[in-house]
Amino acid sequence: MDGFWPTFTRRPKIPAKKTYPLGQEIEGYLKSPRRVLIPLRDDTSSQFNLTISEGKKVGPGERIGEKVRGDGKIALRATIGGEFKGIVKAPVPDGFYSECALIERMEDWDVKDQDLREYGLSGEELLREAGIPFKYDKLRKARVLVLNATQFEPHFGLQNLLLSSNLDELLDGMNLVKEIFGIEHSVICLERKNKDLSEKLKPKLKHSGTIVFETKRAYPRKGKRLLLKEVSGKGTLNEDDYVVFSDPWIFVCTSRAVRRGEPYLERPVEVDGSAFPTPKILMVRIGTPFQEIFEFLGTKMDVLTEIVVGGVLQGIPQPTLEVPVSYDTGLILAFMSLNLKESTESKIYRESTCVRCAKCVDVCPSNIVPNVIVESLRRKLFERALYAGIERCVECGLCSYVCPSRIPLLTILKIAKRDMGLVSGD
Amino acid sequence: MELNLRERLIIRHPPHVTTGETVHCLMFDVVIASIPLLLAGFYFFGPRSLLIVIISSVSAILAEILVQIWHIKPLKLNQIFYQIVTHERITVFDGSALVTGILLGFNLPPAVPLWIPVVGSFVAITLGKHFFGGLGHNIFNPALFARAFLMFAWPAHMSRWVGPVTWEITQSGISYSFDALSQATPLFLAKGQEVEYNALDLFLGKVGGCIGETSSLAILIGGAYMLYKGTITWHIPFSYILSAGILALILGRDPIFHLFSGGLFLGAFFMATDVVTSPVTKSGRLIFGIGCGVLTMLIRVYGSYPEGVCFSILLMNALTPLIDKYTLKFSTVLKG
């Protein structure tokens, strides 16, 4: 009956963070799943063209086509060796249906990944050929490279792990990106509370050309503007000068592509939630369906009720177990329940009317008024929503976390921002 | 090639973790915070004050059920019970009716006839809240709305004050007696001239007045609890009390007397901070508090009523949408 009887203790405004021990390593390696569904689109507007035909056999890392985005072409590569079965439409973690290339594993196939060095490419061409999804047009304009390694999502500990275990490759990758795109400075942002990690990083970073910046609080993935405001200090801020990344893995991949010729075929994924006894960090191939991951971990499928990608605050719910791991999937949460039907849902926790308690206003990191904006959006008063500053929303999800009326503020804001054509940088 | 997408999972919107707080919690926090006020009222005005608060809260709950009972079809006892328990149609379990009843009881003099709280609660719930569309849509604080209604309808009952009681422990038990048959509130006496007062009695509440408003100490304890729990923020009480004190100084009155007498503390911590009828922006809340303080002092000094808290908060409630509208842009530009 939590939420019905009052408690005498204060409720937290920000969810308690789960911290991981620093020495943690990647615990499992799912190298060859039975099949992969490689997402062919990054978002609904991008295009692709495939160069292989149905039934053809491909090796791991073999080029199967390319994605065509606003900033150029990026190679698509088969992530396992096997037979290309065709294009299927499947839900992808970002919350839309995308065409995916279905490749089924063949047992007698050579498992060695393709080496990129035989192309003889270098610089940006090599990164595009390796399939690394940088925003290349932004990188070319930028002067400062910022890695946002603050932990905003309470269960997302992947950044900490990569910073402590893959630091050398990460710094090498950052330096390579700086060199290739002519970027002057690079900054790694850590939360001030995260003392252990910054103590560990500082001596190693001394001569690497990268600075550690300790921020006052954690910033969400899309909170570029807020982060830069703190990083740049006082003075005028030109957002084009900065390019912010929140996934350290992309730099590790850069280093591996340039030094070892490895294309971007796999990434670490954290799995957490009530369906697993302990959170685990796995290395999986891009395109692995979640079902394969859960089978690999030995999860009971019949009690699995809910899968969320991205975290408890901002996560996107997934409709089926066929959803593949995409290029930026970092955290998969799976929840189980022994007996959950629609009728067993508590009536107390349903959405009710906004009582204007202004808890969302007090907690909002970008100082907007979520309840007024959502109220005007529901009445289709888009002018008023713009006036109240909807474009400043960083989609952090804290407003819906604190809302006592259980209004899905974040979901409404996200949908409205997408439909109004407002994009926030990440 | 088609995928087997039949195995559907539950899709819920984020967040997948919440504070666990609901509207009940906000309302019951106010109820918990009002316990020191109830005890103070019981101590200073005798058991009758407790009876008035209980009558007003019970009749507020009954009024809430009666107003919403017409939505239920078919009208059967088990249906009514079901709707109350699940609070689908009858929202009495959200606690707002209880809070309105308790706050209305605090705003009544201890000597009112017992039908006054019943009428007041029905006015508060029907005219004050459900005519505007229920919780979340009301413009005015329902309890203050009912108090204003009662003051205009039965001014004689609403201004019959009794002094604080004295408790005696005798052999036959505990007994109490009133100090005087009729004693006006300090503010009523102060209308026009300065009065002698004992600052400690004024702070503890040993003066005439409404049930909940006299003891500033009890209100501070309750307010501190609400501030700790995050039910209210510091903006409105702080700006209300500060602006009233400063204006009292400017107008040449005794600020200590004006702050601790009358319902200023009750208004600042319990009435003006009503979440539904106060602005949502932070700067708006400050403006709201300042407006309440200024209007309270102006009514007290220049108006014909001795007390101005009720009317000042009602007036600022009416201005809340306007304050919200103009502080919306201001606050985002300033801080964002």
Image (spheres, rainbow, N blue to C red):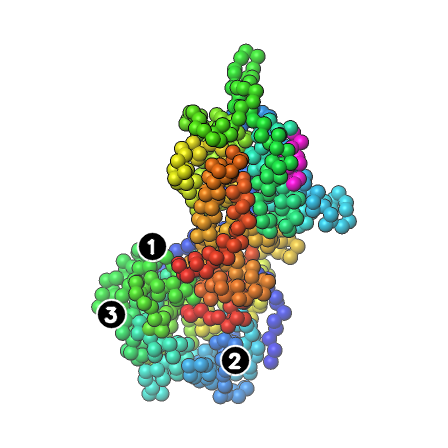
Whether labels 2 and 3 share one chain: yes
Amino acid at dot 1: Lys
Q: Which residue is mark 1?
A: A193
Q: Which residues are magenta?
A: B114-123
Q: Residue furthest top?
A: B171
Which of the chains bears the disc numbered 2? A
Circle 1 residues within 10 Å: few <14, some 14–19, many ≥20: some
Q: Quadrant of the C terminus of chain B?
A: bottom left
SS class, disc 3: loop
Q: Is residue B147 left or right of residue B223?
A: right
In the image, residue A265 lies at what x, y percent?
Answer: 42, 76
SS class, disc 2: strand
Q: Can residue A274 be seen in the rendering of this structure?
A: no
Which of the chains bears the disc numbered 1? A
Q: Which residue is mark 2?
A: A101
Q: Is residue A349 left or right of residue A280?
A: right
Frontmost residue, B176 versus A129 = B176
Specify whether residue A88 is painted magenta: no
